[in-house]
Structures are given as structure tokens and as C-alpha cells.
Amino acid sequence: MIVFNERFEFERDRNAWQLHEWVEGFNKKENKPTRSKYTTYHPSIELVLKSIVDKSCSESTSLKEIKELLSSLNDTIDKVGQRYQSFLDLVSEEK
């Protein structure tokens, strides 16, 4: 599981990429806040990241917020790349 921020996390299963979006809400019946998880499925990691950007930018109120989002996204991409490279290194050592 790759955690992007408090709102988004994503992972790969056998068939697709799963993007989990956490949404804050309020339960009027129990008079308390709630947190719900919505999952969407994507054929590639590129579409997962595009979905994160689309959803986040649509709620941004300034270019500064968008710049911070893109910077955070870039950091996440770097971390994913490092994990993948570590995996490749481990596999090549076993050969």
C-alpha cells in the first residue's frame, strides 16, 4: 500500500491498481464525524496519479496549493521508483 496523503492511498492487485479515497463526513443519526473509504480501479499507475491530480486540483483554491500537490506527487513517484529499483536489485542478486 502506498500512502499519498491522508486522503489518498493506492495499491496494485492481480488485476488493476486500486485507488482508495478517504472522505470525511458526519453521521447525523449518531451525531459524530465519520470517515468513509471509496475505491476506484485503474488499469495503470498513470491513471491513478491522474485521478489524484484531477480530484485534488478541482478543490484547490490557489496555484500555491496545486504546486504543493504536484511536489508531493513527485516525491511519491520517487519513492515508488526507489522501491521498484530495490526490488529489481534484489531479484538480480538472486540470479
Image: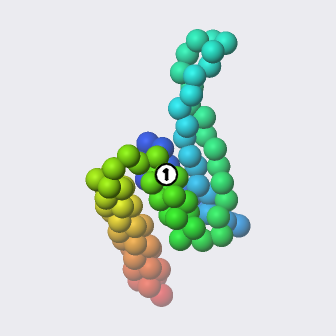
**Residue occupying image coordinates x 71% and y 67%:** 15
Camera-nearest residue between 82 and 34: 34
Where does residue 75 sit, x and y in percent of width and height?
Answer: 33, 62
- Asked whether 82 or 90 is in front, the reply is 82
Between 82 and 6, the one nearer to me in the picture = 6
Residue 82 position (above or below residue 88): above
Residue 93, position as x, y percentages in the image? 41, 83
Which residue lies at the image location 46% right of the left edge and 46% below the top edge? 59
Quarter of image, res 71: bottom left
Residue 69 image offset from top left, x and y in percent? 36, 55
Q: Position of residue 46 (x, y in %)?
A: 53, 71
Residue 42 vertical placement versus 63 (above, below): below
Q: Is 82 located above or below residue 8 in the figure?
A: below
Residue of label 1: 58
Q: Secondary structure at mark 1?
A: loop
* Neighbourhood count class around disc 1 (C-alpha, 10 Å): few under 14, some 14–19, many 20 upward: few
15 with respect to 37 (left or right): right
Give the residue displayed 36% in from the left and 61% down from the top: 70
Instruction: Name the outermost residue toward the right.
Output: 15
